[in-house]
């Protein structure tokens, strides 16, 4: 991935962020259990498609009306245990899915153009911007796509078994940016 990096005004880099804790959370958002979970997270559970919430080292990504993905640098079993304590036996589920996905980060001035080669979403800043995350595809691979900032920086969360393929697909898509821009 380092060897594929492109610098300059058409720059784009790809890196892996291994070992990010990912905990799948399912709970009725109108329940008292959801209130307790929000207090434990220190952030509200996002209520709309594409929305995220962050508090310190944790980010909560909306996956569905009653489903979220909690991302953290903390150890997975500790995060899951804290959320299970907040659930306190109420209907819902807390599952550490950290081994299910990995994290790829694509960044630089040409990052959006690279993604546009194989992502069906409108990634123009007027439609998709920093702090938004949605489930989509990049090439033939299903991913959770999160735009982190205006650089732009994107984090892609593919299933681990597809990560190598997706990384190779992105490296191939990046390759044209090494050459001069065609007017």
Image (cartoon, helix red, strand yellow):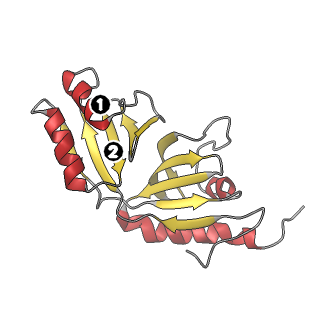
Tell me if residue 177 comes above or below residue 97 in the rendering: below
Residue at the spot 25% in from the left edge and 55% down from the top edge: 76
Proximity of marks 1 and 2: CB atoms separated by less than 8 Å: no
Q: Residue at x 69, y 70 (%)?
A: 6
Question: Which residue position is annotated with label 1?
Answer: 38
Count of numbered circles in the view: 2
Snapshot quadrant of residue 36: top left
Q: Dot 2: few (<14), some (14–19), or many (≥20) neighbours within 10 Å?
A: many
Q: Which residue is mark 2?
A: 70
Residue at 19%, 54% in the rendered image: 77
Q: Is residue 141 left or right of residue 175?
A: left
Q: Quadrant of residue 30?
A: top left
Residue 5: assigned label: none
Residue 118, how many percent across, how many down? 60, 56
User: How far is the residue under mark 1 from the one under mark 2?
Assistant: 11 Å
> Residue placed farthest to the bottom in the image?
3
**Location of residue 37 (image quadrant):** top left
Q: Is residue 93 above or below residue 119?
A: above
Left/right placement of residue 180 relative to residue 130 reads: right
Question: Which quarter shows the C terminus?
Answer: bottom right
Quadrant in which the N terminus is drawn: bottom right
Q: Residue furthest left?
A: 89
Sooner in the amino-acid sequence: mark 1 or mark 2: 1
Q: Disc 1 or disc 2, which is closer to the eye?
A: 1
Q: Where does the image place residue 45, in percent across and percent down from the top left? A: 35, 31
Q: Secondary structure at mark 1?
A: helix
């Amino acid at each position: 991935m380092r060897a594929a990096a492109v610098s300059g005004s058409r720059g784009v880099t790809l890196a892996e962020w291994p070992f990010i804790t990912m905990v799948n959370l399912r709970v009725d958002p109108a329940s008292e259990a959801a209130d307790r979970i929000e207090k434990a997270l220190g952030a509200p559970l996002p209520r709309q498609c594409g929305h995220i919430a962050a508090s310190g080292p944790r980010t909560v990504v909306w996956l569905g009306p009653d489903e979220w993905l909690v991302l953290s640098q903390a150890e997975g079993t500790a995060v899951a245990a804290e959320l299970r304590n907040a659930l306190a036996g109420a209907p819902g589920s807390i599952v550490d899915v950290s081994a299910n996905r990995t994290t790829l980060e694509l960044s630089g001035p040409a990052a959006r153009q690279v993604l546009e080669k194989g992502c069906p979403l409108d990634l123009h800043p007027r439609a998709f911007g920093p702090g938004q995350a949605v489930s989509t595809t990049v090439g033939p691979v299903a991913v959770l796509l999160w735009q982190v900032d205006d650089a732009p920086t994107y984090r892609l969360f593919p299933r681990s078994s597809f990560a190598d393929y997706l990384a190779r697909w992105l490296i191939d898509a990046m390759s044209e940016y090494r050459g001069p821009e065609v007017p």
